[in-house]
């Protein structure tokens, strides 16, 4: 039987199946629809760090993968019960080479959602797939091509923002690549605490470094006294760099360390021959959204699509929801040590 006429089979990646995980990642590396968040390593991270049940589905024809769909169930008394592709990820949904594979994987996702009796199924799609599904119009992403010359990238930054980068250079700031997450986590945890939101556990970032190895990198900006001011943990995927999580200390703004940090990440990516700077996801109307716009990046809508089963509307489990205003203010007042101990129990259920 010719491969094209062979039947398409639905299968599931099991934890510890290194051979299939390698085949899964080889598919992700070449599938145009796939992203870094489709990698098999997320199964280990979501299940081991956050203790969520995973369903990493794939479609296979004649021994060849034709599509993948990473899913995880996030079940919480506080925030509800959901099946998500993929929690803690900016992007998700089906990545496939044929419409048949897309339909097979999405049908199985809905079947499992009903069997698990979840409140909703969430697909974090980059492109719209179902015009008739409820859509979350809150998140956008920012992407831009990296010019082949370093100076061309500097000149492409709008004038006011470019002045901030040059201010950081004038202040004698330097960027360093860290072998561990120590400086990054200290800056990150302090930063999210100031914003009144719980921090991911330290072991999460440690797991990201261990699982993704050279594709996960920490860059930290220091001043002339070697004092860490700003840090970012980034992913590398094909010819792209994606800053995923960051943190700064209070003096970073005055010294332009945050602007300098992203410039250094872009400069290093350019020198490595990368082609795309993916500034990641932001919520509309936030400071992060405005900051990325000021860098000359255009917002691109993300199509987070939902199937609602046991609820009437899309959940709004994010800091922009006004009902969390008091909780945010209270969280800011907690001692940071206590916040870092309590935070992981909350954030694991947010996804």
Image (spheres, rainbow, N blue to C red):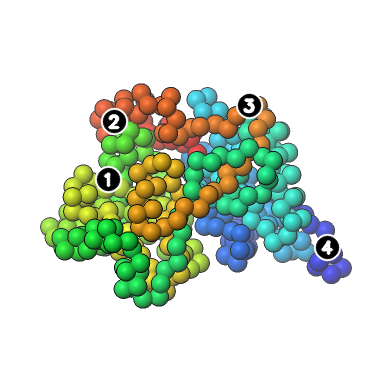
Local secondary structure at mark 1: helix
**Residue 53 in view:** no
Name the spot of residue 126 as percent of width and height, x first. Answer: 57, 52
Marks 2 and 4 sit apart, C-alpha to C-alpha, by: 58 Å
Depth check: 67 or 13 in front? 67
Marks 1 and 4 sit apart, C-alpha to C-alpha, by: 53 Å
Local secondary structure at mark 2: helix
Res 6 label: 4
Q: In the rendered image, which quarter contains the N terminus?
A: bottom right
Looking at the image, is mark 3 or mark 2 earlier in the sequence? 3
Depth check: 248 or 72 in front? 248
Residue at 71% from the left image edge and 33% from the top image edge: 115
- Where is mark 3, residue-wise? 312
- Where is mark 2, residue-wise? 332
Disc 1, disc 4: CB below 8 Å? no
Name the spot of residue 309 as percent of width and height, x first. Answer: 67, 30
Marks 3 and 1 sit apart, C-alpha to C-alpha, by: 40 Å
Looking at the image, is mark 2 or mark 4 earlier in the sequence? 4
Looking at the image, is mark 3 or mark 4 earlier in the sequence? 4
Q: From the viewer's perspective, is 207 left or right of 103?
A: left
- Where is mark 1, residue-wise? 186
């Amino acid at each position: 039987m010719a491969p094209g006429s062979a039947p398409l089979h639905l299968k599931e990646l099991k934890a510890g199946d290194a051979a299939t995980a390698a085949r899964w990642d080889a598919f992700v590396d070449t599938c145009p629809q796939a992203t870094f968040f489709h990698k098999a390593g997320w199964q280990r991270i979501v299940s081991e760090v956050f203790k969520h049940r995973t369903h990493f589905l794939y479609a296979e024809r004649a021994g060849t993968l034709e599509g993948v769909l990473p899913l995880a169930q996030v079940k919480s008394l506080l925030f509800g019960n959901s099946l998500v592709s993929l929690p803690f990820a900016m992007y998700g949904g089906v990545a496939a080479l044929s419409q048949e594979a897309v339909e097979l994987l999405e049908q199985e996702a809905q079947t499992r959602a009903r069997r698990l009796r979840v409140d909703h199924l969430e697909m974090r799609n980059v492109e719209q797939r179902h015009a008739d599904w409820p859509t979350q119009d809150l998140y956008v992403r920012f992407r831009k091509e990296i010019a082949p010359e370093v100076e061309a990238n500097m000149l492409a930054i709008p004038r006011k923002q470019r002045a901030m980068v040059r201010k950081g250079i004038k202040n004698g700031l330097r960027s360093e690549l860290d072998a561990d997450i120590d400086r990054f986590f200290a800056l990150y945890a302090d930063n999210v605490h100031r914003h009144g939101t719980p921090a991911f556990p330290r072991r999460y970032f440690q797991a990201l470094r261990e699982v993704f190895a050279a594709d996960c990198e920490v860059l930290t900006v220091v001043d002339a006294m070697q004092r860490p001011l700003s840090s970012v943990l980034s992913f590398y995927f094909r010819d792209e760099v994606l800053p995923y999580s960051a943190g700064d200390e209070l003096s970073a703004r005055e010294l332009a360390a945050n602007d300098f940090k992203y410039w250094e990440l872009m400069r290093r990516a350019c020198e490595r021959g990368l082609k795309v700077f993916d500034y990641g996801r932001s919520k509309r109307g936030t400071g992060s959204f405005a900051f990325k716009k000021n860098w000359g990046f255009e917002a691109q809508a993300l199509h987070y699509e939902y199937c609602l089963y046991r609820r009437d509307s899309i959940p709004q489990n994010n800091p922009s929801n006004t009902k969390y205003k008091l909780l945010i203010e209270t969280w800011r007042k907690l001692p940071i040590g206590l916040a870092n101990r309590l935070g992981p129990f909350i954030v694991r259920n947010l996804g």
